[in-house]
Amino acid sequence: MSRKLLLVDDDPAILVALEFHFLRSGFEVRTAASAEEALGMLHEYRPDVVLTDVQMGGMSGLELLDAVNRGMPEVDVIVITGYEDMRTTIGAIRSGAYDYLVKPVDVEQLELVVNRCLRDRAARRRVGAAPPGAPAPPDRLDAGVGRSPQMIEIYKLIGMLASSRTPVLIRGETGTGKELVASAIHNYSPWSGEPFVAINCTALAESLLESELFGHVKGAFTGAMGDRKGKFELAGTGTIFLDEIGDTTLSFQAKLLRVLQAREFYPVGSERPRKTQARVIAATHRPIEELIRQGQFREDLYFRLRVVEVNLPPLRERREDIPILAEHLLARSARELGKDVHIIPPRVMQLLQEQPWPGNVRELENAITRAAVLAHGPALSPEHFVFQESHAAERASEPATDEIGTLAQAQRRHVERVLAHTGGNKSRAARILGVSRPRLDRLLAQYQAGVTEVGV
């Protein structure tokens, strides 16, 4: 199997370090100090994989990615950057990047990604499949804030989902931002000009929910004075977002299953079906598998909805995102209130990071807004917040007795708790766990790949 790499970065020290590592690991390596230099080498060198930085003098790494996709689509591109925002991540994945890694990158972890990429290339050649990636439409407004490893993976998934119309099931606790993720999938898609229609399934009775989604004809029920189009019809080729799908009745679930299977629905009171092309994204905070066991949710609908599943982490598991979230929410609150309040002192930020936030981002948003209302100057103060002393959220994060699981699962939970305790600082976490940083990175890579093994 060919192992030809082209490394692109305008930092000579990074180029030297990466070149040394990959040469020692048996790769054939060439380097370029700019995207322009890399483009000039592509056709002559014909690498298997390009590893590129994003921000460089002149052409950016994302522009290089687009040029590679147009000129040599058989070449895979891995993006490495210090810019871990949502827009850049989604833009890179939608533009066809094989993966997107945030500096500082451990070289052993990077080598794992490169080797996985090479294996995927070999598999594609065996089955004659095309490489990932296609030119992407322009970026839309960001719909999420966070730079933790968990959120970077969510952004990658959004980028991959945006170009398809497959159903998506978003899972997460209340207040984690499920609708924001659904909106981002829609906004970054080629159908972003079509409507995004959100429905809270809990807020409507079954009969009203059916009328709202499927519409009704004149005389269908008391008060139906005329025909009314439902959300599926109004959405066109856009997106229907069904929030709290786990709270719907079995009767409604049967009707929704027909929509997903046959792409058609019946308005209430009508015997003539109507077609729909709308994409369905559903969300829930409830344990669907348990609802299925209790006979409260259709298993066939569950499998139809979760073609792809997105799991949003609670805020307590990504505490390193709290500072950027708090600053973002304060800026928005100050703008809406028309107040000049923009400072979160260190002692206040420490208090925010110590809270369990059982209501997640929504609770943090409410707390920040309240503090901004009460602030008399440009800075927030501890007395502007009301923190309830409760360990319920911490207890809720512990596994139930019947969910204790295996030793390997317990080890994984402990590693994840230590990472949360250190705010995502892997070096500190490795010291607490008594392992080397590369060993911790290997464990995290295995967890990400769905492999759980015992032995730190």
Image: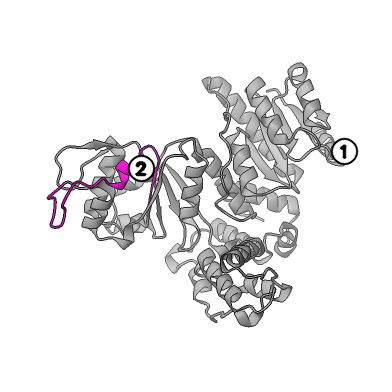
Most extreme residue toward the front is 338
Q: Secondary structure at mark 2?
A: helix
| Main SS, magenta residues | loop
The Cα atoms of the two marked residues, 1 and 2, are separated by 51 Å
- Which of marks 2 and 1 precedes in the sequence? 1
Is 367 magenta? The answer is: no
Q: Report the residue at 56% width, 49% height from top.
A: 154
The C terminus: image quadrant: bottom right
Residue type of the residue flagged with mark 1: Pro
Does residue 219 belong to the magenta stretch? yes
Residue 347 higher or lower than 8, as above or below: below
Mark 1 closeness class: few <14, some 14–19, many ≥20 residues within 10 Å: few
Magenta residues (range): 218-241
Would you place residue 361 above or below residue 146 in this image?
below
Residue 174 position by quadrant: bottom left
Kindly identify which numbered label has been placed on residue 12.
1
1 vs 2, front mark: 2
- Residue 216 lies, in percent from the top left, at 20, 48
Q: Quadrant of residue 417?
A: bottom right
User: Which residue appears at 52% of the width and 69% of the height?
Assistant: 363
Crowding around mark 2 (Cα neighbors within 10 Å: few <14, some 14 to 19, many 20+) is some
Q: How is the image coloured?
A: one colour
Residue topped by disc 2: 235
Q: Residue 383's spot in the image, x, y percent? A: 63, 83
Residue 243, percent from left and from top: 38, 55
Is residue 356 something one can see in this rendering?
A: no
Near-viewer residue (137 or 262) = 137
Relative depth, front residue between 119 and 297? 297
Q: Residue at x 68, y 23 (%)?
A: 1
Vertical side of 315 occupied by 127: above or below: above
